[in-house]
Every structure is written in structure tokens, then in C-alpha cells.
Amino acid sequence: MNQTIVLVDDHPIVREGLATLLHAVPGYRVVAQAGNARDGLDAVCAHRPDIAVVDLMLGDTLALRLIEEIAQSCPDTAVVCISMHSDVAYAEPAALAGALGYVNKANVSRTILDAIDSVLRGVPYFPPQVQQNLLRRARGQAAKPTTPLAALSPREIEILRMIGEGLTKQQIAERIGRSANTVEAHRTNIKRKLGLDNNAELIRFSALNLLPAPAR
């Protein structure tokens, strides 16, 4: 029986490369590809694949919301993230959003098959530090933050990135599909968690601590 896969990446060359690699594996079948979050969610909901391989950075936006939506709408589909970043500050939010695997794009041709095989067997595939933190959470123990960002939720990291990009509260609200008041509440929570006093410190923190989006 074939294991079905949907690929979501905004770079066609990456999608085609992954599709070629996966089609060569007996029992794997790529049933759809998408280049953005909206089309990706539509493809996953339409095909209900066993695996969704999702690029963590779609355009200039983290795909955390897409991961959450897949987990909620298609709980039988396991998400494996691919990313240019190996930093725990990216892998851990992806895991908390609902991903079951995380692969660095630098090694994707060597590790994506291991990640998919592991996830299909019900074994999460993450960097060791992320595995340890998730295990602590499962045991009800507070994971010791590995970076200041570890204290933030996936949505808070997404908003912090937009703040660092110079987006206004209204622009952020429009991008994430929420009200300006909701964005302000998130900003207040972010400042509280990071021990920051004002928006200027928030912008500076984002610039110094949040990795930039990959160059297009």
C-alpha cells in the first residue's frame, strides 16, 4: 500500500527535487504539490495524505499557522518540516505547532527519507535538544529555555518576526487574520515573557535575536 505525500514549498526546484527523490522510493507516492500556505492546506484537505512535507518559511512568513491548521483539520496527516535553519529556535516552535519531524534543507536529500520513515512508524524526528525539551513537557516538567525565544509560542514568534520587519499592528492583524486588539495582546505577552519594557525594546530584541528570513 502506497504512503501518500503532499509537498508544500515556495521553490518549484525544491518541490521537483523532493518529488523525484520520493517517487524513486517503492511505496511512496507524491499526490500533490503546492507553492503557498493556502494551496498547501487545500491540497492536504483534498488528498488527506499520510505525510505533508512543509517548508517552514513560505515566502516571508513562518508556516506555523499552516502546520497548526493541518494538525486540526487533518489529524491523520503527519507534518515533516524542512528548513534552511538548524537552530532550535525554529525547530521547537514547529514541533509545538504540531509538526512531527524537522529536517535541515542542507541535508534534506540524505535525511528526508529517514524522517518520513520515522514519522510513519510513529517516532518523531527532531534535533536532540528539541526531543529533550518535548520529553520534559510531556512529563510535566518545565523545559529549560535553550534561547530566549523558547519561552514564546509559535504565534508569538511569528508576530515577533513581523515586528522586526517593521510591520504595524494593523498590518500584522491583516496578515494573520486577527484583530488589532489580538495583536496588541500578543505584543503585551511577548514583552512580559521576555522582560521588555516597551515597543522599542521589542523591535531591538527581534533584530538581535530572531534569525532573518532566507534571502530570496
Image (cartoon, rainbow, N blue to C red):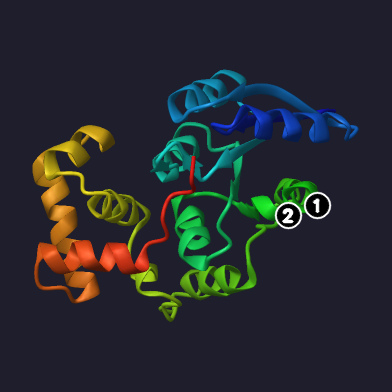
Q: Quadrant of the N terminus?
A: top right
Instruction: Please report the residue visible at 52 percent of the width from the left and 23 percent of the height from the top.
Output: 45
On screen, residue 118 versus residue 126, left or right, reads right
Q: Report which residue position mark 2 lands on.
A: 107
Residue 123, x across and y down, in percent: 70, 57
**How far apart are the alpha carbons under marks 1 and 2?**
6 Å
Instruction: Please report the residue visible at 33 percent of the width from the left and 56 percent of the height from the top.
Output: 157
The correct choice, above or below, for 172 with respect to 145 in the image is: above
On screen, residue 31 versus residue 165, left or right, reads right
On screen, residue 76 versus residue 171, left or right, reads right
What's the amino acid at mark 1?
Answer: Arg
Q: Secondary structure at mark 1?
A: helix
In this orientation, which residue lies closer to the viewer: 114 or 109? 109
On screen, residue 27 versus residue 192, left or right, reads right
Residue neighbourhood size for the residue with mark 2, other residues' Cα within 10 Å, grouped as few (<14), some (14–19), many (≥20): few
Q: Report which residue position mark 1 lands on.
A: 110
Residue at far front of view: 215
Marks counted in the figure total 2
In this orientation, which residue lies closer to the viewer: 158 or 134? 158
Residue neighbourhood size for the residue with mark 1, other residues' Cα within 10 Å, grouped as few (<14), some (14–19), many (≥20): few
Q: Secondary structure at mark 2?
A: helix
What's the amino acid at mark 2?
Answer: Asn
Discs 1, 2 touching: Cβ within 8 Å: yes
Residue at far top of view: 46
